[in-house]
Image (spheres, rainbow, N blue to C red):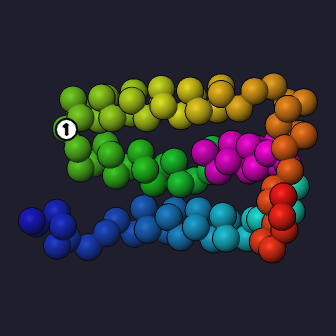
Amino acid sequence: PEQLAAPADPHLMEAARTAASLMAKKDWAGIETLEDAYQMAHEGEHSEINSVFEAVISEYFPVSVQQQFVQSQLREHLERLASLEPLDWRLSVRPRRAGSDG
């Protein structure tokens, strides 16, 4: 309860605001293929939001929970990325636009 009521770390909050701002500025409408979306997701995974996530996990969770959680998340994430087939296929997948019949 004391941790929940305590003020947030100012550096952590600034990193979170910066990461959120950068993601909001992305050209989401510019995504034309699954490859575009893949690259944007990959970029997001390596953004400053990871430093925020890492700080929260390391500060507020016991080491045993940290290890299990991080390992399971990494495995799941890598499996999803690996299932997206080769680059040629990702480039061929086009988005469905609102109001289209495709």
Find residue 8 and report its image quarter.
Answer: bottom left
Q: Which residue is mark 1?
A: 62
**Percent x, y of residue 59:** 27, 48
Give the farthest residue toward the front: 101
Q: Is residue 27 visible?
A: no
Say whether residue 46 is left or right of residue 32: left
Range of residues picked out in magenta = 33-45
Find residue 27 and report its image quarter.
Answer: bottom right
Magenta span includes 41: yes
**Percent x, y of residue 42:** 68, 42
Crowd band around label 1 with a 10 angstrom C-alpha radius: few (<14), some (14–19), many (20+): few
**Percent x, y of residue 6:** 20, 71
Magenta residues, dominant SS class: helix
Magenta span includes 35: yes
State the residue at coordinates (71%, 32%).
84
Q: Nearer the viewer, residue 44 or 90?
A: 90
Give the farthest residue toward the left: 1
Is 94 above or below relative to 25? Answer: above
State which quarter of the image contains the N terminus.
bottom left
State which quarter of the image contains the C terminus.
bottom right
State the residue at coordinates (23%, 44%).
61
Q: Nearer the viewer, residue 73 or 7?
A: 73
Is 4 above or below relative to 75? Answer: below
